[in-house]
Image (tube, rainbow, N blue to C red):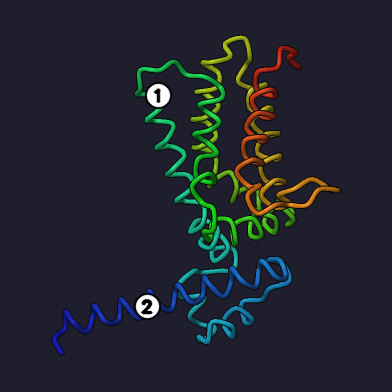
Amino acid sequence: MTVSNRAEQELNSGEVTRLKIMDAAESLIIQHGFAATSLRAIANAADVNLAATHYHFGSKQGLLESVFHRRMRPVGIARLGALSALESGKAALTVDAILKAFFMPFYDAEGSELLTILPGLVARIYAEPAVLTQPLLEKEFSQVASRFVAALQKTCPGVSEQEMRWRFHFMVGSMIQFLRFQAPMGLVNEADGFRDGLDRLVNYSVAGIEQLGVVE
């Protein structure tokens, strides 16, 4: 085996180990939460040496960031791509079109891991103390949020950036609630109800974004 082949094999082996650790961490965090999940438990579930978790991620916080980033990065890329396409088109920007670009990854995700894994992971992240999760959420979402807030302001010129950020904040909270519980209390979630629920969420969010009353 040549030196280059050996190096490539070691690199592939390292990536396999890294993915195994992230898969195990993701599963345990969804089941038990971040605080209740130890690095040793993750290493045991991944069938790797405890030292491997430190080698690949540096710390438990670093592992959490990697797990969350792996799931959220494709969503962010898809959202920004949809928004860029919308902004470069000839049609006038509307709140409805902008929000559909934001929710677009979920319209395209029925039956995928995005809907079977991400809601549980996000719910656990938001359940952790803010001092732990706020920096992670800021790092992961700030660019996307700023782009969408700026686009929405163009359609609602009478709404300040501060007010628009509040409205966007409440919309994201509604989205998290819907992804976690896809039907209201007292109603049964039907198999074909997810897209209908998304449409309802978009309509609800449009009304909130476009509301005339402004709190300053």
* Name of the residue lying farthest toward the left: 2
- Measured as percent of width and height from the top left, residue 78 is found at 43, 43
- Of 107 and 117, nearer the camera is 107
Q: Which mark is residue 87?
A: 1
Between marks 1 and 2 in the image, the one whose residue lies nearer the viewer: 1
The quadrant of the image that shows the N terminus is: bottom left
Check the image and name the residue furthest to the bottom.
1
| Left/right of residue 213 with respect to residue 90 in the rendered view | right
Location of residue 62 with respect to 215 vertically, above or below: below
As helix, strand or loop, the secondary structure at mark 1 comes to helix
160 relative to 21, above or below: above
Q: Is residue 104 left or right of residue 29?
A: left
Amino acid type, label 1: Glu
Q: Amino acid at mark 2?
A: Gly
Q: Residue furthest right?
A: 186
Q: CA distance from mark 1 to mark 2?
A: 41 Å
- First along the sequence among labels 1 and 2: 2
Residue with the mark numbered 2? 14
- Sort mark 2 into few (<14), some (14-19) or many (20+) by Cα contacts within 10 Å: some
Q: Position of residue 170 (x, y in %)?
A: 71, 34
> The C terminus is located in which quarter?
top right
Where is 26 relative to 181, above or below? below
Position of 3 compared to 30: left or right?
left
Dots 1 and 2: beta carbons under 8 Å?
no
- Residue drawn at x 35%, y 22% as measured from the top left: 89
